Amino acid sequence: MLPRLLCTSLFVGALALAGGCSKSEPPAESQAKADGAATQPAETAMKAAADKAPEPGVDHHSFANSDDYRVQHLDLDLTVDFPRKVLEGEAVLKFKRLSKKNPPMILDTRGLEIESIKAGRGEQMEPVKFSMGKKDDHLGTPLEIKLPKGATSVAIQYRTSPDASGVQWLEPQQTAGKAHPFLFTQAQAIHARSFVPLQDSPKVRITYNATIRTPEELRAVMSADNDPQAEKDGVYEFEMPQPIPSYLLALAVGDLEFKPMGERTGVYAEREILDAAAAEFEDTESMLEATEKVYGPYRWDRYDLLILPPSFPFGGMENPRLSFITPTVIAGDKSLVALIAHELAHSWSGNLVTNSSWRDLWLNEGFTTYLTNRIMQNIYGDERYQMEMALGYDDLQATLKDRPDSDEILAVNSRGRDPDEVFSDIPYEKGSLFLYELEQKIGRENFDQFLLDYFNKFAFQSIATEDFVQHLNETLLKQYPDKLDAERINEWIFEPGIPEGAPHPQSDAFTKLDPIRQQWLDGEIKAGDIDTKGWTYHQWKYFLDGMPEKLSGEKLKELDSAFGLTESKNNEVAFSWLMIAVRNQYKPAYPRLENFLTSIGRNKFLRPLYRNLVETDQKELAVRIFDEAKPGYHPLSVKVNSWVIYGEDGE
């Protein structure tokens, strides 16, 4: 989303269960002895890192006893009931036994109503006893199932809650066409359990088949093998043959049409925005091909996009075969298509090689942000690449000012927290910057080969930060002992902040704007005298984000009159301007502010704007707008922005 890894002798037991080390590989300790003194600094640094790591390979955000039973396949048969706002049907989980004992199976649920459960082997299924455990505010409720001996599958009849945290039901007026309802799911981080009872942990990978029953006038699509030619008959069949973690389960139902963009790429959307989306994202096939040339084959058959209504809480979600995309990036000039590159890049980093717990989120997002920048360079050139890199660095610096030291660590300790809290620019931009430093030290060609080997070695596996550190120890640290330092790698991953001497990406297209901005601030030139012809969105964002905290009403009016910022059609530019307007209570922009907050559900925009309102003593306005907008927000947006406005205690 926009926006993994060591096996020292301390962790061999835990990581073997997580799939992080193959049995054919010697433990790090014995390997170090065989290699001799040259590996001692790396071993020392990794042991220091290991001492700080909270139980690598353990997922504290799942109740599931996946060390006793490991689910391998899911069969879903669900009916989509728009009037009641529920999904109802059966989930059949086929699993492998990892324990010789026969303990109860524990699954993750949140707000599910379980009607009955059968268990057994093959077709021999019988009713079994089950119970619901104590509800946890962050994790939901464990489902405990008593299994007959030898059972290898369970069949669960259930229905979801109308307010399931991972499902949003939209009324017709909330869609582009205004004629039909719309449904979409959002499973990351731990919301799959709100619409399927399962082992909701990224370290558990499953294949799945699904039958989805819908109103006949609507089309269902999933993170699976979609058929755009499928007849609209109310019954849709899906298969996902590649194993995925549960957070990549995805379903959407609406009045959707399809338009191809290339041999393996296309876009699903409502008719009203289909052509605009296909034109905006027409370079997707070129992105896919460029990525394959460097990082190996695309292993998911097709890569299509689904354009969701604007209430979608993220920029995009990397659901395999079908990325879910916000319409807020349809700018008309391809200025925001880095988001498409990001979701595509997840097909290698995140979907193919996955973090085994949310503590290791940077393994998904840091790698993907690095790949995103490389894709943008390959397709749009060096200047665009430099601007994207520089903006990412500035975003990281801003985030570092706001986060506590404990949240500045890549391998963040997320235990005891809602995993949605660990999403910030730290795993994305700090993780990317770390990889960029490795590239700078050993050379791009060498680093590309390292990444290619990494994706091949860990393909379709879920791994922890320690696995990655161990992989570095066995590869780059041996190959380039004069260029890489294990203690510095430890500092990047396990210490807060940015190590001294880290790369500082800059862009000539930005640095020339600094004196222009300053001249305007000093009154030496008028806003209307600034030549903005040819400015990209990136330059507008840099120009606005570099403004001082306080600006006079006169200065704001001058900017707005010269450039029409309040009415900007580019949502990123509008956001930067509205942040300035809120800080300085520039009231002419407030009608646009209210419209922006009530028509868009993307948390990248919502959270900072609401926070700015609260921090500038405009909480009453924030509450009024939030109360008006809340019925159209995704449950995740409601939760996150409630924290911002009211605090986690609701006050």
Image (cartoon, grey):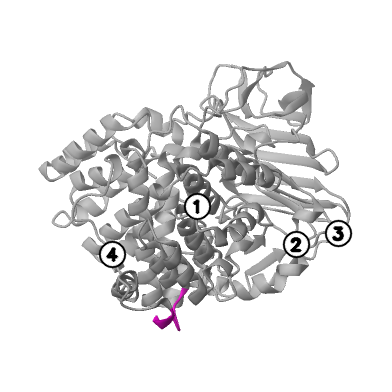
The local crowd at label 3, few if under 14, some if 14 to 19, many if 20 or more residues have their Cα within 10 Å, is: some
Q: Nearer the viewer, mark 2 or mark 4?
A: 2
Q: Earlier in the sequence, mark 4 or mark 3?
A: 3
Q: Nearer the viewer, mark 3 or mark 2?
A: 2
Q: Which residue corresponds to the image point at 27% horizontal and 46% vertical from the top-left?
A: 492
Q: Position of residue 238 (x, y in %)?
A: 73, 51
- The answer to whether residue 372 is left or right of residue 495 is right
Is residue 326 part of the magenta span, yes or no?
Answer: no
Is residue 535 part of the magenta span, yes or no?
Answer: yes
Q: Which residue corresponds to the image point at 65% horizontal and 70% vertical from the top-left?
A: 277
Q: CA distance from mark 2 to mark 1?
A: 33 Å
Q: CA distance from mark 3 to mark 2?
A: 20 Å
Magenta segment, prevailing SS (helix, strand or loop): loop
Q: Which residue is mark 3?
A: 232
Q: Which residue is mark 4?
A: 446
- The answer to whether residue 85 is left or right of residue 623 is right
Q: Earlier in the sequence, mark 1 or mark 4?
A: 1
Look at label 2 and name its amino acid. Answer: Ala
Residue that sits furthest to the left in the current view: 37
